[in-house]
Each structure stands twice: as structure tokens, then as C-alpha cells.
Image: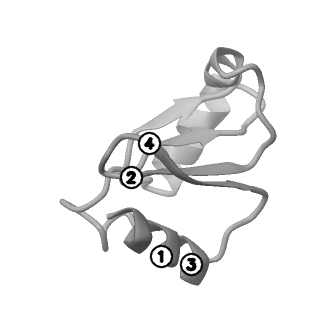
Amino acid sequence: MAEEYENKAVFFGVSNQDTIEDGKGYQADYEVPYPLGHAPEVWELFNDPVRPTTIVIGSDGAVSTEITGPVTYEGLKKDIEAAL
């Protein structure tokens, strides 16, 4: 989806691996095409939110959608389109 919305939306992820090293391994193994922060450092910054959490921020900089739990391609696409 990051590639589909290239130049229209920015994606940033956070790995939930047990260590930073494991998270970097995941990023390399799966060729994640967007910046990836690594647990536990990022989670500490946000008071350890429920994982997974997906946040869509609109072009105005405000949170458009916040989803706790798994997301579907169709659902995320709808949320991104609404935020653009």
C-alpha cells in the first residue's frame, strides 16, 4: 500500500519485535519500503499504546482515523482516501 500511495501519503511503521535488532532484521527480510521505528523505544515515547494501532493523519495534520487491532487492505484504503 505504501508503494500504491507513493507521493500521496507517507507511511511510518513501528516493529513489535522483542529487540531492536530483531526489528531491523524484519525490516531487511521483508524489504519494508517505509521508515520503521523499533520497539521498545518508540512505544515508550507514546506511553506504550495498544498494539497494533494504525493512525491515519489527514492533510490538515489532524488524526483522521485511529484503529486498534488488525486492519484490512480495503478498510485502510477507505480511511486513506477519506484523509486525502
Residue at 60% x, 77% y is 75
Q: CA distance from mark 4 to mark 1?
A: 18 Å
Q: Nearer the viewer, residue 9 or 31?
A: 9
- Given this view, does label 1 or label 3 mark the residue nearer the observer? 1
Q: CA distance from mark 1 to mark 3?
A: 6 Å
Q: Nearer the viewer, residue 61 or 33?
A: 61
Residue at 65% x, 76% y is 72
Q: Amino acid at mark 2?
A: Gly
Is 51 left, or right, of 31 in this rendering? right
Is 14 left, or right, of 10 in this rendering? right
Q: Secondary structure at mark 3?
A: helix
Q: Which residue is mark 2?
A: 58
Residue at 23% x, 62% y is 8
Q: Which residue is mark 4?
A: 62
Q: Amino acid at mark 3?
A: Tyr
CA neighbours of label 1 inside 10 A, class few (<14), some (14 to 19), many (20+): some
CA neighbours of label 2 inside 10 A, class few (<14), some (14 to 19), many (20+): some
Q: Which residue is mark 1?
A: 77
Q: Is residue 56 above or below residue 20?
A: below
Q: Position of residue 32 (x, y in %)?
A: 44, 53
Q: Secondary structure at mark 1?
A: helix
Colour pattern of the rendering:
one colour
Q: Amino acid at mark 4?
A: Ala
Q: Position of residue 82 (x, y in %)?
A: 42, 70
Q: Nearer the viewer, residue 58 or 43?
A: 58
CA neighbours of label 4 inside 10 A, class few (<14), some (14 to 19), many (20+): few
